[in-house]
Image: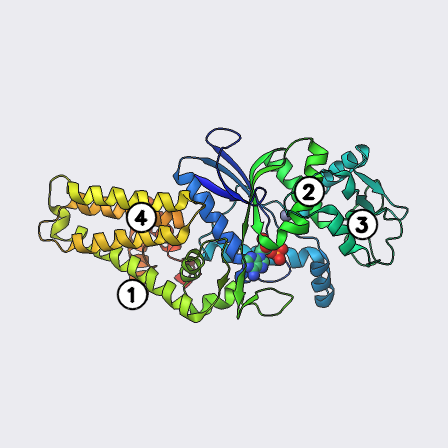
């Protein structure tokens, strides 16, 4: 299995630190608004990477954070006249709803910066003890960038070039900074901002320290994979390396993966440019599975332009998969489903070969575009097999099992959600009422749960049962 490592600028064979296990950290969003579809790209890509590792038999410890203390959150809170916590809590909940819609599985842990302040104070103290950081007179703590000899190794930048680029900028209030390259680990509070008590001043952490601390706490000093969008390579990930490696005295992450941007009209989609579309907007016009399939239609290291044409192509692709699965479902319910006998050896061989094609594509730095092409070939094989006169159940089941398995790796749901009709709800409620009368509470509970799964919430009132769609 090969992964392109930003650190070496090469594809490298994946060797885990601990056999059979993957420790993976992905930088998550800053929560001050609904996430846009640019933010959804790393979420979908790295969720797929995680799913593929699991399909290959690895146990994945997947950590992705929410940045919930930041200038933009504080600004949004001031504008609305509410606390920063109210803003971040609201948008974490909204982000989780979008993730569910995109079929992005919850991480093993979703840490939040504001709940990890003690760990940040510990790591900053350790950096000061090791002379990698210093506190200025006003309580700001800076990282002494030049002391970290490997600075620039991820972004392939030379530290002297960086300095000449920085020299002209002098920011007021930073007079105590020893070097323009030094970056902030802790900063004093300003009026009206959230703050925490620290040995240096009442204040709040810089952005970079949170990821170093959360990765250490939930995954250990050395991790397998660290990932995020390519805009994070410099300075965020470079600074994370400097912090973690100086504090822990070992390599931080072995493989660094970065997705290219999602663009719109040839420009990066971003909140600051104002050219973004939220996942929530898109969900009004499309099944979010289409958005997911669209993201997987390109290699993650290639820029991808958001366009109606590509979304329509993704919608067609998804429909092709779902139609193929529907044909198999129907055939298995019909006469072919009853046909006995062993699975057709020729079909099984073709299926194994196409399955290998899928795996080979994913093994080659997660080439989801080629993997999807292999899946379409399986759909084609399935469509021709299903119409054969003497096809038996075992053959159809083998096709269905493989398609379902590979869809799951890509996070694609192979059957469209069927809206339950009002009449069907009424019929089940009547059946439940009858079951309760007969004291068959197990059946009554089963019906309530089944309806809940389909988004129908029941309420028992004095005047009988009412229901609503959630
Ligand atoms: P942010 O909330 O800006 O810190 O972004 C959260 C994640 O989304 C980071 O991994 C970013 O690199 C990524 N990201 C932001 N905008 C885009 C974009 N247009 N395309 C791809 N990834 C993006
Ligand atoms: Zn980060």
**Is mark 3 in CB contact (under 8 Å) with mark 2?**
no
Q: Which of 411 and 379 is in front in this view?
A: 379
| Mark closer to the observer (3, 2) | 3
Mark 3 crowdedness (10 Å alpha carbons): few <14, some 14-19, many ≥20? many
First in sequence: mark 3 vs mark 2: 2
**Quadrant including the N terminus:** top left
Mark 1 crowdedness (10 Å alpha carbons): few <14, some 14-19, many ≥20? few
Q: How far apart are the alpha carbons under marks 3 and 2?
A: 16 Å
Secondary structure found at label 1: helix
Horizontal side of 328 relative to 287 (left or right) equals left
Q: Mark 4 points at which residue?
A: 404
Q: How far apart are the alpha carbons under marks 4 and 1?
A: 30 Å
Instruction: Return the x and y of residue 9 as percentages of the image width and height.
Output: 55, 45
| Mark closer to the observer (3, 1) | 3
First in sequence: mark 4 vs mark 1: 4
Secondary structure found at label 4: helix
First in sequence: mark 2 vs mark 4: 2
First in sequence: mark 1 vs mark 2: 2
**Is mark 3 in CB contact (under 8 Å) with mark 4?**
no
Q: Mark 3 points at which residue?
A: 187
| Mark closer to the observer (4, 1) | 4
Which residue is painted at 57% across and 50% down in the image?
228
| Mark closer to the observer (1, 2) | 2
Q: Mark 1 points at which residue?
A: 423
First in sequence: mark 3 vs mark 1: 3
Figure quadrant of residue 319: bottom left
Q: How far apart are the alpha carbons under marks 3 and 4?
A: 51 Å
Q: How far apart are the alpha carbons under marks 1 and 2?
A: 51 Å
Quadrant observed for ligand 1 in the rendered image:
bottom right
Q: Which numbered circle lies on residue 116?
A: 2
């Amino acid at each position: 299995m090969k992964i392109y490592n930003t650190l070496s600028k090469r594809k490298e064979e994946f060797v885990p630190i601990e056999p059979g296990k993957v420790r993976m950290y992905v930088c998550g969003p800053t929560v001050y608004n609904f996430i846009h579809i640019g933010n959804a790209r790393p979420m979908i890509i790295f969720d797929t990477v995680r799913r593929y590792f699991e399909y290959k038999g690895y146990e994945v410890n997947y950590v992705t954070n929410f940045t919930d203390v930041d200038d933009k959150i504080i600004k949004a809170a001031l504008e609305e006249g509410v606390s920063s916590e109210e803003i971040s809590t609201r948008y974490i909940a909204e982000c989780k709803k979008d993730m569910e819609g995109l079929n992005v599985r919850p991480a093993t842990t979703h840490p939040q910066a504001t709940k990890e302040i003690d760990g940040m104070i510990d790591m900053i103290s350790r950096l000061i003890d090791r002379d990698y950081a210093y506190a200025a007179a006003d309580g700001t703590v800076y990282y002494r960038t030049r002391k970290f000899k490997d600075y620039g190794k991820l972004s392939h930048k030379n530290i002297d070039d960086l300095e000449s680029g920085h020299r002209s900028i002098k920011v007021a209030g930073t007079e105590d900074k020893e070097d323009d390259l030094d970056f902030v680990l802790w900063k004093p509070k300003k009026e009206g901002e959230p703050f925490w008590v620290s040995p240096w001043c009442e204040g709040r952490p810089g952005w970079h320290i949170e990821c170093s601390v959360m990765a250490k706490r939930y995954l250990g000093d050395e991790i397998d994979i660290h990932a995020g969008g390519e805009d994070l390579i410099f300075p965020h990930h470079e600074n994370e390396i400097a912090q973690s490696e100086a504090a822990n005295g070992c390599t931080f992450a072995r493989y660094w993966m970065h997705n290219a941007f999602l663009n719109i009209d040839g420009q990066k989609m971003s909140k600051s440019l104002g050219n973004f579309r939220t996942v929530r907007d898109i969900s009004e016009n499309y099944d979010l599975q289409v958005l997911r399939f669209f993201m997987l239609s390109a290699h993650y290291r290639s820029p991808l332009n958001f366009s109606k044409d590509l979304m329509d192509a993704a919608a067609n692709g998804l429909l092709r998969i779902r139609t193929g699965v529907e044909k198999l479902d129907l055939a298995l319910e019909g006469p072919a489903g009853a046909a006995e006998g062993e699975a057709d050896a020729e079909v099984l061989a073709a299926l194994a070969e196409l399955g290998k094609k899928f795996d080979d594509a994913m093994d080659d730095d997660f080439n989801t575009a080629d993997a999807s092409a292999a899946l379409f070939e399986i759909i084609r094989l399935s469509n021709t097999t299903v119409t054969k006169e003497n096809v038996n159940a075992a053959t159809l089941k083998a096709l269905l099992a493989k398609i379902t398995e590979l869809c799951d790796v890509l996070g694609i749901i192979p059957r469209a959600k069927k809206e339950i009709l009002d009449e069907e709800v009424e019929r089940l409620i009547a059946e439940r009422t009858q079951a309760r009368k007969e004291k068959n509470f197990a059946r009554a509970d089963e019906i309530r749960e089944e309806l809940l799964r389909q988004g129908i919430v029941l309420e028992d009132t004095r005047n009988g049962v009412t229901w609503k769609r959630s």
